[in-house]
């Protein structure tokens, strides 16, 4: 397909499919008795027998069998597994609400520095001044970015941040002798929100969306009352839309004594544009593995710092790193006066926090604003390219992502959102998020991020258009839709998820 | 500053023009002007990669990292964070960008690499714990404990939680924080001579009994007595296991554990100032529907080819929402993949070797300390690779003084042991990385600073 939209001389798109169709046996199948890879330090410590060290009643009677492979086997196996894994480093990953942007390599190198990576978490404070400096500076930067007063870096991921935020909410109300029982969540919210509310000891009240895709203010008014502890909102919301009534929503919630919780999953497009604190939020969690480019590791580690307005600062988890006021050292630890306690064993996912500190330092104020600009530009440009091909529910300019629907195509051709997602894998792109948010039928939620070039976005749009045209053509010809059984060129084809659940085999030992 | 955004000025102009816009500011027209940030972020300008590297080297110089042979502090601190060997092969494979820069395996067709590695991780944890089901990771040991307690309370319908004081004090602290939301009744059960005094427990019901194996102060607890208490109270037995001990000690699964949790940082993850680490959780087959977090299962694809997929998804937050058994979404997959690699490197012989090397080093150090009359052992219970010392001066002071001598001399027991006979004792840990020479010098250094 031609790409008239691109400038003359523009480079090629940068995204590619996976290769490799052979099954890779498990490590256990490579095992041969007596083969080994490990070697350890020479210690010169007397080699006592196990029963000379530990009472025999505690000793295991048999060997703990793991696998017996050579280093070469190990490298071959995990290299072949790597070849069966799509990643941001390979190509575009437009997974909505996940902000799968490119992760700068220098941030990885920062996290590998021995002076940070080899520090034991119980090392006395005066011997970890460098680490505390990084943590304090990161906290300060995150507060400036969100417009909040103080933050905890302890939560290890977004969901841990949510629960921490809800416990802060609870502590705040309880300190005022205020027994509140409900937390309001819009029907477009991420699944972690209601799950966290339950663990925070609250009941969920769901409010609907209005015709524009925003929180329905009339329903919200009906749901509010003196028993409402707060509301959890994502803004921009999961439709990629900025909640234009946010100031009114904040006023209404505050009026009944509730607090506003900001789910920071979608913080990327508002960096340097608008701050949750200025929208009226009291508690903000951030996903550093989204907005601040720390790699997601195939599902983690993340980091989910929580920033709060001044009235909640005294409840933050602790002890927390602070600039020392006594003057004997630069940085020290302090327990906030009404701290809810620890939410992590140590300081949080420190090496992830260091990567985010590095990313913020590299970008600075201007770089972060450019992130927001180009993330929003990419999402809107992609969306406009798809107009007329897919349905546009809640048709308004978007922020970081666009949610399109396969509704009409499904009706006319039988192709579902899932089919589009699966077929896209063969064009060298990861799939968008599918069937979310729940309020959109046959939803595809696409977040291109700022780090993909116009050429790559154009190729993604072309692929999505080709998939639609292919379905229409095949339907007209009365042939089976290619997308209905795609992908066929990937390392494995569609998997039987029902069988996995019906006959659970979750270890090699359960196979037999 | 480096630019991770590829758009040139011309790219931007063309894209804006296509959208009928004149400036990037117009992209944000939906944001009410009154709340827009005037003047931009109050942060410094971006720096080049080289500038940041210089800055980080300077800041890092204010940390005392662990090391060997004069390159850093010789580490005798443990308490769930251990100085184990991490070979080049583990770093190289775990650092592959296909593992590092992938998202959660939502599309199994292009995520078999992570999924199969997690399947191997689950197999390893199942064998280590002695229980058939392992999830694919949680944030760290404390998070795994919290999830295990939630599981046990849901299963038994009793929110009374009996926790041995031999559990990591910070994990107990995290458990107490989250109990404020769930309303669980946490009761601490004291230690006598390093071992949990289950006989002091009264009442006739509870949701769960939590014991360390070996426990935080190093003692190998009797799982049989914890099991019989759990039976008497109708509770589940949750065991916090040091997974390295499995190379030598009976697995908690064979000792009657219903759920086994712990911290698996020891398998390939650096000390990392406490995170990211790796929480593991294994359970009995009958509890699988309550398992928190992701689980990878084996299946076949359309052509009958063996493949892997996340399974029993109906337990999870994105489907069950407010009725989910846990809110966990992002976990510690990369650390689990790392552990699978490291356990492959260690193999059957290596896991036994690091376990016995730790035990030998601890045994050797204990004999050396026994030669100093002014120093006592805080407990006499059988130990695996950790023990506690009572010194003539406070443990925290000892640690500060020994930093100057080039040692991270263990952990001072304070938080969680206030008012007990263990307060201000020194908890020491040993791994396969500690040599006879290091221990001899360390014992002499402890004597020098603590015995005056």
Image (tube, coloured by chain):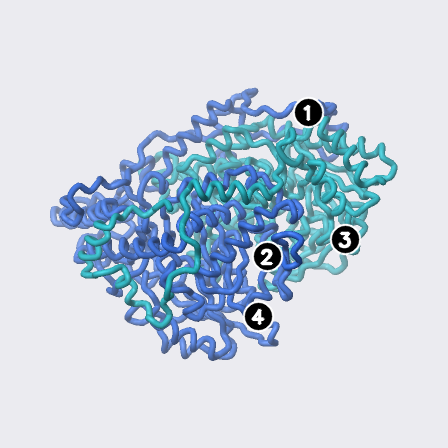
Chain colours: A blue, B cyan
- Element at label 1: loop
- Quarter-of-image position of residue A406: bottom left
Q: Secondary structure under badge 2? A: strand
Quick check: B327 above or below B57? below
Farthest top residue? A34
Q: Which mark is residue A322?
A: 2
Q: What is the x, y in percent for residue A238?
A: 35, 61
Q: Is residue A31 left or right of residue A267?
A: right
Q: Determine the image quadrant of residue B407.
A: top right
- Comparing marks 2 and 1, which lies closer to the viewer? 2
**Foreground label between 4 and 3:** 4
Q: Is residue B98 left or right of residue A50?
A: left
x, y (%) of residue A189? 40, 63
| Label 3 in the same subunit as label 2 | no
Q: Which mark is residue A172?
A: 4
Alpha carbons under labels 2 and 4: distance apart: 22 Å
Say which of marks 2 and 4 sits in front. 2
Q: Residue at x 59, y 68 (%)?
A: A171
Residue at 45% x, 52% y: name it: A288
Above or below B173: residue B39? below
- The residue that mark 1 highlights is A43
The chain letter under disc 4 is A
Is the residue marked by circle 2 packed among few (<14), some (14-19), or many (20+) residues within 10 Å? some
Mark closest to the chain's N terminus, 4 or 1: 1
**Which residue does the image show at 60% across and 27% down from the upper left?**
B350
Q: CA distance from mark 2 to mark 1?
A: 41 Å
**SS type, badge 3:** loop
Are circles 3 and 1 on residues that touch, CB within 8 Å? Answer: no
């Amino acid at each position: 397909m031609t790409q008239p939209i691109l400038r003359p001389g523009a480079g090629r798109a940068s995204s590619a499919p996976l290769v490799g169709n052979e099954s890779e046996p498990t490590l256990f199948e490579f095992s041969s008795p007596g083969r080994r890879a490990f070697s350890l330090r020479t210690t010169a410590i007397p080699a006592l027998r196990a029963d000379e060290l530990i009472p025999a009643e505690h000793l295991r009677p048999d060997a703990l069998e793991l696998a017996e492979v050579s280093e070469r086997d190990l490298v071959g196996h995990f290299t072949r597994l790597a070849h069966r894994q799509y990643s941001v480093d390979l190509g575009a990953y437009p997974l909505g609400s996940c902000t799968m942007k490119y992760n700068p390599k220098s941030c990885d190198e920062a996290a590998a520095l021995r002076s940070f990576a080899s520090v034991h978490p119980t090392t006395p404070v005066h011997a970890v001044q460098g680490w505390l400096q990084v943590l304090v500076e990161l906290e300060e930067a995150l507060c400036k970015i969100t417009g909040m007063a103080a933050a905890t870096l302890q939560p290890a991921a977004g969901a841990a941040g949510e629960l921490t935020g809800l416990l802060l909410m609870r502590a705040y109300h309880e300190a005022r002798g205020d027994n509140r029982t409900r937390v309001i969540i819009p029907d477009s919210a991420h699944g972690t929100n209601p799950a966290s509310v339950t663990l925070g000891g609250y009941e969920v009240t769901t409010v609907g969306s209005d015709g524009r895709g925003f929180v329905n203010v009339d329903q919200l008014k009906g749901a509010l009352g003196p028993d409402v502890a707060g509301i959890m909102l994502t803004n921009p919301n999961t439709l990629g839309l900025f909640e234009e009534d946010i100031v009114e929503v904040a006023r209404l919630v505050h009026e009944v004594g509730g607090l506003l919780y900001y789910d920071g999953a979608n913080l990327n497009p508002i960096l340097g544009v608008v701050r949750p604190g200025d929208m009226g939020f009291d508690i903000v969690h951030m996903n550093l593995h989204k907005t601040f480019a720390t790699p997601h590791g195939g599902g983690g580690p993340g980091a989910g710092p929580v920033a709060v307005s001044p009235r909640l600062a005294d409840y933050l988890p602790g002890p927390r790193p602070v600039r020392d006021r006594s003057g004997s050292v630069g940085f020290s630890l302090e327990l906030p006066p009404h701290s809810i306690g620890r939410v992590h064993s140590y300081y949080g996912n420190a090496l992830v926090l260091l990567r985010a500190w590095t990313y913020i330092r590299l970008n600075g104020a201007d770089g972060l604003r450019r992130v927001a600009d180009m993330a929003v530009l990419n999402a809107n440009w992609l969306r406009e390219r798809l107009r007329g091909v897919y349905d546009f529910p809640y048709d308004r300019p978007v922020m970081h992502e666009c949610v399109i629907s396969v509704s009409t195509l499904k009706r006319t051709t039988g192709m579902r959102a899932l089919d589009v997602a699966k077929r896209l894998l063969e064009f060298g792109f990861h799939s968008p998020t599918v069937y979310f948010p729940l309020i959109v039928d046959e939803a595809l939620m696409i977040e291109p991020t700022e780090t993909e070039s116009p050429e790559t976005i154009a190729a993604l749009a072309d692929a999505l258009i080709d998939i639609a045209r292919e379905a229409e053509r095949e339907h007209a010809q009365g042939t089976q839709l290619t997308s209905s059984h795609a992908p066929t060129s990937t390392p494995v084809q569609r998997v039987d998820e029902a069988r996995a659940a019906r006959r659970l085999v979750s270890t090699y030992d359960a196979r037999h | 500053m480096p630019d991770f955004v590829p758009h040139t000025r011309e790219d931007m102009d063309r894209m804006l023009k296509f959208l009928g816009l004149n400036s990037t500011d117009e992209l944000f027209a939906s944001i009410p002007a009154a709340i827009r940030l005037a003047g931009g972020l109050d942060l410094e300008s971006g720096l080049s990669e080289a500038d940041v590297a210089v800055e980080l080297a300077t800041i890092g110089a204010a940390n005392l990292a662990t090391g060997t042979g004069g390159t850093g502090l010789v580490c005798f601190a443990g308490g769930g964070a251990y100085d184990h060997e991490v070979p080049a092969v583990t770093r190289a494979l775990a650092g592959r960008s296909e593992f590092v820069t992938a998202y959660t395996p939502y599309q199994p067709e292009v995520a078999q690499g992570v999924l199969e590695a997690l399947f191997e991780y689950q197999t390893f944890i199942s064998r280590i714990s002695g229980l058939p089901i392992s999830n694919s990771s949680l944030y760290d040991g404390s998070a795994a404990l919290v999830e295990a307690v939630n599981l046990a309370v849901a299963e038994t319908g009793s929110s009374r939680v009996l926790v041995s004081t031999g559990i990591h004090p910070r994990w107990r602290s995290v458990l107490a924080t989250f109990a404020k939301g769930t309303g669980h009744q946490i009761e601490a059960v004291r230690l006598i001579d390093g071992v949990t005094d289950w006989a002091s427990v009264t009442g006739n019901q509870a949701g769960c009994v939590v014991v360390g194996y070996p426990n935080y102060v190093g003692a190998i607890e009797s799982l049989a007595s914890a099991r019989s208490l759990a039976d008497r109270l109708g509770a589940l037995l949750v065991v916090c296991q040091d997974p390295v001990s499995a190379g030598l000690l009976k697995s908690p699964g064979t000792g009657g554990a219903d759920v086994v949790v712990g911290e698996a940082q020891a398998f390939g993850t650096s000390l990392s100032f406490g995170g990211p680490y790796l929480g593991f959780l294994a359970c009995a087959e009958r509890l699988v529907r309550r398992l928190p977090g992701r689980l990878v299962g084996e299946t076949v694809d359309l052509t009958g080819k063996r493949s892997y997929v996340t399974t029993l998804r109906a337990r999870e937050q994105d489907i069950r929402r407010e009725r989910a058994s846990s809110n966990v979404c992002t976990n510690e997959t990369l650390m689990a993949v790392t552990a699978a690699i490291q356990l492959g490197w260690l193999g059957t012989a290596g896991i036994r070797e690091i376990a016995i090397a730790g035990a030998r080093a601890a045994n050797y150090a204990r004999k050396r300390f026994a030669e100093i009359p002014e120093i006592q052992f805080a407990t006499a219970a059988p130990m695996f690779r950790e023990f506690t010392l009572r010194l003539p001066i406070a443990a925290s002071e000892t640690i500060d003084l020994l930093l100057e001598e080039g040692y991270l001399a263990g952990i001072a027991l304070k938080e969680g042991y206030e008012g007990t006979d263990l307060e201000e004792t020194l908890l020491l840990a040993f791994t396969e990385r500690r040599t006879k020479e290091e221990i001899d010098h360390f014992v002499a250094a402890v004597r020098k600073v603590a015995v005056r």
